[in-house]
Amino acid sequence: MNDVLSRIHLAGAIFLRAEYTAPWACESPSANELMELLRSKARRLVLFHIIAEGSCWIRLRRGDYVEAQQGDVLVLPYADKHAMGVAEHPPPVPISSLLPAPPWQELPVIRHGGGGGRTSVVCGYLECDAPIFEPVVNALPPVFTVRPPTGPAADWVNASIEYALDASGLSSARASLALRLPELLFLEVLRLYMQSGPPELTGWLAALHDPIAGRALTELHNEPARAWTLDELARRSACSRSTLNARFTRLVGRAPMQYLAEWRLQLAAELLQKTTLGVAAVAYRVGYESEAAFNRAFKRAIGKPPARWRTSAA
């Protein structure tokens, strides 16, 4: 799990603080509208809401509904359009109508509602730039909530939120560090969510908890450049080829060797972006015996050969 999480490349920020008083309800922009508002060119946005005080509900257009209380972190992996509010509420107000016009020189704070019980929400976003492979994010439900346990994890989450809010709008080293806090916060929340083993886990996350598929994933991640065969992977996973192939494909959504090929290309993209290794060296590092075969596979997945992609991604 940590190996994949460490390779999810994220950038983002806390972009809004909202002070609501009952009765209230607000509606978010769509993902495309939000990307325009934030001037983001990312492939994917992940939204999160931290309930700093009070309680509320969140409802997606597709019907997903969760309730949250003070201390909860709400995560929307696909940045779906959604409404938030309290039990007795007026029609939702578009949150964009409450925001000042961008660009924002400091963190916007909106105040809205009827003057009753207070709910304070801190809103943030993350841009996901994984060029090929997003097994973690793709396996998450449209919305979920995490409540950090008492102790160091909860203290760290709360301290991170306060630090980011205090540093917003400052052109200092503190502000630079605060820009990384949403990424660190999201990864910590994701770890807590996966450790809780919720019943709605699907895809890669469910495979991680499976004794057969999980062992195969561990082997592939420990030695991605190894000349794996399905026979050897099945032997290390203590099952037959057919059992491994069926279980892995059902949970992960792709056969083991296809998963390995995509994971190798993800690692290759990271090496191309972060190192000065030549294309041939990158190909060898991730398990390709031929630079030509690597070039073909990379272009088929990305749309550009490795050298051109490296230049465009710089």
Image (cartoon, grey):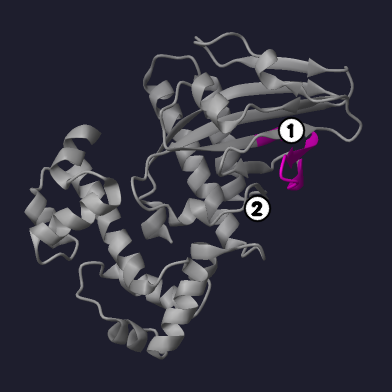
Position of 244 with respect to 57 (left or right) is left
Q: Nearer the viewer, residue 307 or 107?
A: 307
For mark 1, give the secondary structure. Answer: strand
The residue under label 1 is 83
Position of 151 with respect to 222 (left or right) is right
- Residue at the spot 56% in from the left edge and 32% down from the top edge: 31
The 10 Å Cα crowd at callout 2, few under 14, some 14 to 19, many 20 or more, is: few
- Residue at the spot 47% in from the left edge and 67% down from the top edge: 252
As drawn, 159 above or below 102: below
Give the percent coordinates (x, y) of residue 51. 70, 35
The residue under label 2 is 149
| Quadrant containing the N terminus in the rendered view | bottom left
Give the percent coordinates (x, y) of residue 45. 50, 36
Give the percent coordinates (x, y) of residue 57. 78, 39
As drawn, 274 above or below 282: above
Q: Residue 133: which numbered mark, if any?
A: none
- Residue at the spot 39% in from the left edge and 57% down from the top edge: 4
Q: Nearer the viewer, residue 13 or 101?
A: 101
What amino acid is labelled 1 in the image?
A: Ala
Circle nearer the N terminus (1, 2): 1
- Residue at the spot 54% in from the left edge and 21% down from the top edge: 166
Decide if residue 314 is in sight here. no
